[in-house]
Image (cartoon, coloured by chain):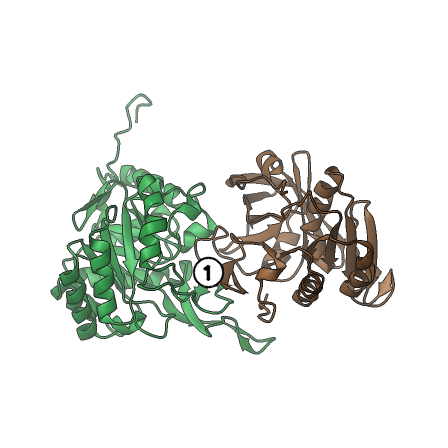
Chain colours: A brown, B green
Amino acid sequence: MTCSANPRPAESQTAVRIAGNRRVGAGVHLLRFRAPAIARAAQPGQFLHLLAPGMALLRRPFSIHDIDGDGIAILYRIAGQGTALLSRLRQGEPLDVVGPLGRPFAIENGRPHHIVVAGGIGIAPLQLLLRRLRAAKLSPLLCYGCATKTELRPHLRVKRIVATDDGSCGAKGFVTAALEAALDRYPGAQLYGCGPWPMLKALAAIAARRRLPCQVSLESFMACGVGACQGCVVKAVDGYRTVCHDGPVFESAAIDWDQEPVV
Amino acid sequence: MNRNTPVKPVDLAVRVCGLRLKNPVIAASGTYGYGAEYRRLAPPADFGAIITKTVTLAPRAGNPPPRVFETASGMINAIGLANVGVEAFLRDKLPGLRRCGALVIANIAGNTADEYARLARRLDGAPGIAAIEVNISCPNVRHGGVAFGTDPRVAASLTRKVKKAAKLPVIVKLSPNVSDIAAIARAVEDAGADALSLINTLYGMAIDSRRRRPVLGNVTGGLSGPAIKPVALYCVHQVCQAVKLPVIGIGGIRSAEDAAEFMLAGACAVQVGTATFADPGAARAIARGLAAYCREHGFGKASDITGALHK
């Protein structure tokens, strides 16, 4: 059974003021603002399309990291001009927010276990998912991998398995290897993932091999954000799908994992 | 002015090839999907008319990603006319659009002149379509597209075929990727077109120097956005001096002032595309702003702006 609300919440365009925007790690920032309507409506895995002062033209999509009351948190890594510009904005500066957009994670209540797999900044959309899974008393397991322990972001207190490339925290190696080692203890688990393409590809392979359902969150360059321009497509097994509207959350079995997008 | 003097309402309605648009702002093809996608953020009813994503006879998957990329004051795209095909358009997309009360113009493209004619014939009888815009200017497909829009004789021959196939008004959308756009415009006018729209995107390319690869999956694409506005204004001005047909201006319009500039150059209406991506409220703001512009400059109606450029 799926408890994810259906149909999707209505999106809107809202002007907000930045409540906070601070560096929380190397090249990683946390942006906060109040947006009551979005905070009420948004579901885990959905994203917001942001326009900040100084952005030349197009908006930038960011997944919703967390919701606290009326407050929205966006966790982002500086990856290009848009995120660099965003990182320089201060409290009180305006933001134009469109959202919530996209297909959310579907929380499958009927599954015996729920395993959330995060790679690096891929933790961004998974914090809210963990929160909702915990609220639904589904006691999620977080498998969290990144390069080194200083890159680990604070997250909800849930059961977890950590893996780092350098072994500075948890197991040394890929998080998907750590997941694989643990999976026998979680038969019939629902998997959820977000992270670099190779990690998601490995996760999808594990899910296929063990016949486990798996939802992944993908990213792409976007223009419209609402499924109108067909600009942000990813290759699925049955043709191109828009990341903004058909996704960003997809069943991992629906994606053609040999077609790695350039992001 | 006395505070109590009522503000005289400005008539924003314009007429384009027999159609009455309640305002001069039209959603540009390819930027507005089939309308439903933007129904909450930029409702179809805000626009004077909406032009659908190009439809082709058969569905098209489109080009490999990446398909869009932001460049200086603009964006480059190579979508490749991804669309559901004309039958699915008529069955699944058009009914919703009709319910919105929008004036719908269908944009068509074919691989051959015969395909354009067949599309025009198929759409001609469909209830809820007010006009056909003929895309002879898509830079991102291997067959057809801009190939029909760069030679005056080819463009004229295609226009004649489409006109013969449909009773609906036919708007021909021109490419700026030609040496003499006025010559194309004259040829299309002589062939019987009812209106012209211009410009489609300019050929463009982006390269990722770090990866030493083209950014777009299609290698090349089409440039749109504020970066192309001066080119578009030039083309509209040239064409308006060369033909008597109504001209719809397109290219980097994101404010009422931008729209007014195109109308002063001779356009009777404008299309807004890339600006909607940045600000879904752009069309509504432009329509309102045009009313303010009219009041400020003593135009009783928006159509009076057309061609009112001081020499």
Tell me which corner region of the image, top left, top right, bottom left or bottom right, holds residue A198.
bottom right
One can see residue B54 in this view? yes
Residue A252 in the image: state x and y as whole percent. Answer: 62, 60
Q: Chain of mark 1?
A: B
What residue is at 77 percent from the left and 47 percent from the top? A140
In the displayed structure image, the side of residue B287 where residue B246 appears, left or right? left
Residue that numbered label 1 is attached to: B73
Badge 1 amino acid: Ser
Residue B131 in the image: state x and y as whole percent. Answer: 22, 52
Residue A96 in the image: state x and y as whole percent. Answer: 54, 44
Helix, strand or loop at disc 1?
loop
* Depth check, front residue: B195 or A183: A183
In the displayed structure image, the side of residue A83 where residue B227 appears, left or right? left
For the N terminus of chain A, give its image quadrant: top right
* Depth check, front residue: B131 or A106: A106
One can see residue B177 in this view? no
Residue A227 in the image: state x and y as whole percent. Answer: 47, 53
Name the outermost residue toward the bottom: B212
